[in-house]
Image: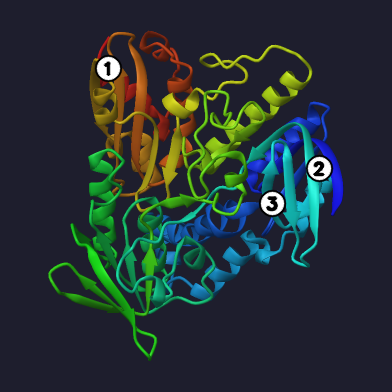
Amino acid sequence: MSDNTYDVIVIGAGPVGENVADRVVQGGLTAAIVERELVGGECSYWACMPTKALLRSASALRAARQLPGAREAVTGDLDAAAVLGRRDSFASNWRDDGQVSWLESAGIALHRGQGRISSARVVDVTGADGVTTRLTARHAVVVATGTGALIPDIDGLRESAPWTSREAASAKSVPGRLVVIGAGVVGAEMATAFAALGSTVTVLARDGVLPQAEPFAGELVTESLRDAGVTVRTGAEAVSVKRDDAGAVHVTLAGGEVIEADEVLVAIGRTPHTRDLGLENIGLTPGDWLTVDDALRVTAAGDWLYAAGDVNRRVLLTHQGKYQARALGDAIVARAKGEPVDTGAWGRHAVTADERAVPQVVFTDPEIASVGLTAAAAGAAGLNIRVVDYDLGSVAGSSLHADGYRGRARMVVDEDRRVIVGVTLAGPDVAELLHAATIAVAGEVPLDRLWHAVPAFPTMSEIWLRLLETYGR
């Protein structure tokens, strides 16, 4: 067993782990990163990038069909093979050469294999050849191993070789019939994508579509899915699944109805990649989420172990994990140099946005873009709120954007402070409006000051003026 010592060891080379290691090295420390699969992680190969590539072609086609002149130039439907080919390119054809090259250029050491914590600040990495390398950290070990799809205990489901988000994102062909169990972000997006590619899709939405979003968002997406030919079964629950000898999948619902499909996609949640990390060697439970404090330290393991990204369950979004990683990397450097660490609200090393200003886009039709709290969440938090809604389709910029534009905007105002604590936008291309909302929420910009942020005319950003006018001065 060879031995290597670094200032910081990061387990997991997805975007979160890469950002931690990069900030550490930029701060003058040494770093090693451990990865058992592809450098670049879930987002690069089985999530953010390939799934958005699957969705984009259909979105562009819908946009063209909503504009006279462009509509007449469009003939035929999507070329599924071309869409899948473009998806492959955004997944780098599932090769990580480019990501590995970046690690080398950044001065970050890569150790391929399964990393397991054997004791405080010690990580053993077992490669595909069975050889184990021992890594020792002077200052910190960071777990950034992310999550995998949760497979529920539905009778026969595991034996039926279900799709998870990975198989959906990397599918080599379009199934004729697809059943989707779950209608959160992954379920709604993949139903949108595969319906556009030609699948006959059935969504089993036990808790409704996008249940964590503002209710109007889920209602608009449900209506759009149905308009696209998707069967949305709100309240439906699968109780058993069986794949027959011919390869067809039979999904039995509570009540006895059976739905037959070519593939079944499970999209009901995530589970942490902590089962094979050696957590038992430091008094933690394998398979558990890693609970962290405001400094992202794993509270039950002392002052040397940190967890960033999905694995700490604060916010399961790539961009928010990268935000955590940047703050954490800088904090580790500061501690190593004996410098002050500021984890107070909105401090340099804080991750305050995890609680107050998380942005998210669901790339369905229509897009759903949100930041901060929903009205229900703000009310549950005890805030004195006022909810302001506006028809996004009546804004001049929206009517120019597409004929028959349909959308809605909501801002949630903390009346005691007169600041916005949440915004939700629903409509085509609203993703590009989100960062303005994020700045308003994260910056706690007073409403009186927002009146001086004048939106250009005629753009969809005029929705800000309309929301303020509806709120009143």
Q: Secondary structure at mark 3?
A: strand
> Which quadrant is the N terminus positioned in?
bottom right
* Mark 2 nearby-residue class (10 Å; few <14, some 14–19, many ≥20): some
* Sequence-earlier tag: 1 or 3: 3
**Is residue 458 something that shows in the picture?**
no
Residue toward you, 440 or 211: 211
Q: Secondary structure at mark 1?
A: loop
Q: Is residue 435 left or right of residue 5?
A: left
Q: Is residue 171 left or right of residue 85?
A: left
How far apart are the two marked residues, 1 and 3, measured between alpha carbons? 44 Å
Disc on res. 108 = 2
Residue at 54 percent across and 41 percent down: it is 284
Residue at 26 percent across and 47 percent down: it is 218
Q: Are marks 1 and 2 in contact (CB under 8 Å)?
A: no
Tell me where residue 421 appears, x and y as whole percent: 36, 22
Q: Is residue 117 left or right of residue 224?
A: right
Q: Quadrant of residue 371?
A: top left
* Sequence-earlier tag: 1 or 2: 2
**Is residue 421 something that shows in the picture?**
yes
User: What amino acid type is highlighted by mark number 2?
Assistant: Ile
* Sequence-earlier tag: 2 or 3: 2
User: What amino acid type is highlighted by mark number 1?
Assistant: Leu
Tell me where residue 212 appears, x and y as whole percent: 31, 41
Q: Up-down: is 53 above or below 15?
A: below
* Mark 1 nearby-residue class (10 Å; few <14, some 14–19, many ≥20): some
Q: Up-down: is 295 above or below 105?
A: above
Residue farthest to the bottom, as pictured:
246
User: What amino acid type is highlighted by mark number 3?
Assistant: Gly
- Of badges 1 and 2, nearer the viewer stands 2
Disc on res. 115 = 3
- Of badges 1 and 3, nearer the viewer stands 3
